[in-house]
Amino acid sequence: MLNTLKTAFLWVFTIWVYLASYVTMISVGLFAYIAKWTLGHQRAHKYVYIPAFSSAIVFAGVRVTVHRHPGFDPSQPAVFMQNHVSVFDGPLATRAIPSAFVGLFNSWHFLVPGYGWFVKAAGGIGVPKGSGRLRSIISQAKARATAGLSILAFPEGHRTRDGNVRDFRKGSFVMAREASLPVVPLCVRGMWEVESKRGWLIRPGHVEVYVGQPYRLDEYTERASLDTFVDEFRKNHVAWVEKDATPAEMNSL
């Protein structure tokens, strides 16, 4: 009986969270462009986009603890590489990234009413289909870097199906290198228990995020050297997610 009541509550709670988050996105999306042109990009991010985007985390009852490497510089635009677990990964990132940033999305995200308007107005980078994808995102990343904006990317490409960290694709790292932006590991644990591909019910919980030190990619011009770097970089996420590393242990990586 208690399990039935708990499941019923989670269904009602989940529907409420999705509806509240979507209504917020639509409401803000309707005047997002006005905010961008009246407040300026940086202020619009601070006062409009980020509060609205992070509302999903508030609605879902997620408690977030953020740990940052001593060498992390919040004033330096970067490409934040986050392990991909949940549909709430983007809103979660707003709690860890202390500056204005945009997301790297498949272009179809822009077609979603409300949410699509919102991320496009915020300056999200759309990844097109077909040839020329890499050239397109590099060009867009350079423009965002010039505007002083960071970029959030999910190098796994898709959400994990088992809670572990999947292999990292190289495209977002090439994008960062060509845009002269450092890459920063953004390692998340606890979100698998809140919301993931194992089921769409939302369970309030505690999530820990580790923001690592920045790495510049200028020297990794050869494919083999970049492949080696990406494999080593991924170990940050594996240590945090799969081995329950402490912040002190992460600082030693």
Image: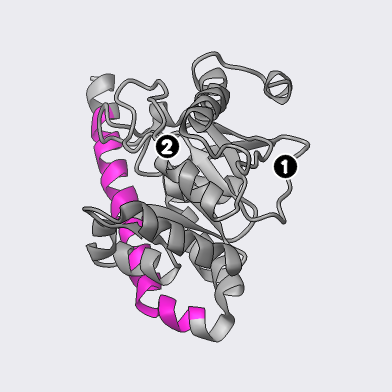
Taking the spot 52% from the left edge, 70% from the top edge, the residue there is: 48
Q: Could you tell me which residue is drawn at 59 percent across and 42 percent down?
A: 183
* 21 relative position to 172: left or right: left
* Mark 1 and mark 2 residues within 8 Å of each other at the beta carbon: no
Label 1 vs 2, first from the N-terminus: 1
Helix, strand or loop status at disc 1: loop
Q: Label 2 amino acid?
A: Lys
Q: Which residue is mark 2?
A: 170
Please identify the residue farthest to the front as the structure is shown. 222
The residue lying furthest to the top in this view is 243
Q: Compared to 39, does 15 lie above or below?
A: above
Q: Position of residue 31 (x, y in %)?
A: 40, 79
* Distance between the alpha carbons at the discs numbered 1 and 2: 23 Å
Where is residue 148, by image quadrant? bottom right
SS assignment at label 2: loop
Query: In the image, residue 137 lies at what x, y percent?
Result: 40, 57
Task: Give the magenta part as a residue range.
Answer: 7-36
For residue 227, side relative to residue 6 (left or right):
right
Q: Which image quadrant: the N terminus? A: top left
The amino acid at mark 1 is Phe
Q: Which residue is mark 1?
A: 72
Expressed as whole percent of the image width and height from the top left, the position of residue 157 reads 34, 38
Count residues near mark 1 (Cα–Cα under 10 Å), then give few for <14, some for 14-19, many for 20+: some
Looking at the image, how many numbered discs can be counted on the residues?
Answer: 2
Relative to 57, is 127 above or below? below
Principal SS element in the magenta part?
helix
Q: Nearer the viewer, residue 142 or 114?
A: 142
Which residue is rendered at x = 45% and y = 68% of the image? Answer: 122
- Residue 32 within the segment the image draws in magenta: yes
- Asked whether 40 falls inside the magenta stretch, the response is no
Q: x, y percentage for residue 113?
A: 24, 66
Specify whether residue 153 is in view. no
